[in-house]
Image (spheres, rainbow, N blue to C red):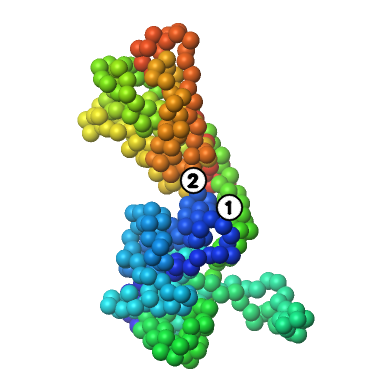
Amino acid sequence: MPTSPRTAAIIVAAGRGLRAGAGGPKQYRTVGGRTVIARAMEAFCDHPDVFAVQPVLNPDDAEMFNQAVAGFRYRPPANGGATRQASVHAGLEALAADAPDIVLIHDAARPFATQALIRRAIDAANITGAAVPVIPVTDTIKQVDASGAVNATPDRATLRIAQTPQAFRFDVILDAHRRAAREGRDDFTDDAALAEWVGLTVATFEGDAANMKLTTPEDFVREEARLAAALGDIRTGTGYDVHAFGDGDHVMLCGVKVPHNRGFLAHSDGDVGLHALVDAILGALADGDIGSHFPPSDPQWKGAASDKFLKYAIERVAARGGRVANLEVTMICERPKIGPLRETMRARIAEITGVAISRVAVKATTSERLGFTGREEGIAATASATIRLPWNEKSGSA
């Protein structure tokens, strides 16, 4: 075997996830603000030693899949089969022309595989040819008969919980799947069991207790709570922006083009709502302000759409491992009237940021005909943003 094997990964995502309850296939539901499948694929797509990521899907899920993993590096999805075993076989055949040395087979319902776990999987398969990640069994296990009566208590010291990614020499596991298909065997619940059936010795390596499979509604509740607990650094930032009116026939407000008898005098599109939001997010991050990241002296931002600035601020939160908990904008103007456009603006902010619309508020008030907004010389906006970041115990900050 080569020192640095060519490694591919198969992400099995064709299941329907019925035990997870209502809400569609569990791999496309969110946990911690992101889809399960995006979390499951990310570590493999970003891993420097994985040259190809091969998703296996139910073709009915193509649109959901494309939305969930936009921007990821992966091969065209293969169509899954009626069983997990058939889906893995389809993924292996899709990779056959590339003939990788090692293949990692991972369940999309395990969204918390780390790059360290992937590294251990590659190393184990490179040494043994077939290996699975395991964690110890901590509870006493009972074997029962058809009536539910206990008939044995296995020694838990010899028991392990198997996880994925399971790792194999590609040629060996492909041959095993082809043999099972020829002989009509479609009852293997994981690839290690199929490998055992053809006579392979399957080694084990250290798994990860956090790499649990999401199966039931309770699993989603547990993981939401775990992820929220990890984001204990809760911060709030505020923002303010104002632009004067000039010539024009519309204004941009909260990402929405609003017909008006005036336009904004501004270097960019003058969207005071989004500008205030950007400042609020950057303030919560203690990361400067909109002018320091997008200086008005820079000609590249002349006439720029402000959704670019807001996406950038959201990316800064994600880069710190954080989540947005709430966004709020208050528009201060006499006209145009914001009330009829409130829901459209909320939806647009949610679209730009990827934040649920239930976490976005847009409000409006007047200045009772006082000041520059009262004289309809311009529009002002205030904003607040609440974000959650991982807590750094040493520094007290993210």
Of residue 58 and residue 8, the one placed in the foreground of this image is 58
> Of helix, strand and loop, which one carries label 1?
helix
Question: Residue at horizontal 53%, vertical 78%?
Answer: 189
Vertical placement of residue 286 versus 319, above or below: above
Q: Residue 322 carries which label?
A: 2
Question: Residue at horizontal 43%, vertical 74%?
Answer: 81
In the shown orientation, is residue 225 left or right of residue 56?
A: right
The disc labelled 1 sits on which kind of residue? Glu
**Residue 373 x/y as whole percent:** 41, 13
**Residue 246 x/y as whole percent:** 27, 16
> Of helix, strand and loop, which one carries label 2?
loop
In the shown orientation, is residue 287 left or right of residue 264?
A: right
**Mark 2 Cα within 10 Å, few/some/many (few <14, many 20+)?**
many
**In which quadrant of the rendered view does residue 5 lie?**
bottom left
Q: Residue furthest right?
A: 149
Q: Decide if residue 289 is in sight here.
A: no
Residue at mark 1: 224
Q: How many marks?
A: 2
**Residue 25 x/y as whole percent:** 50, 61
The disc labelled 2 sits on which kind of residue? Gly
In the shown orientation, is residue 200 left or right of residue 97?
A: right
Question: Residue at horizontal 22%, vertical 30%?
Answer: 299
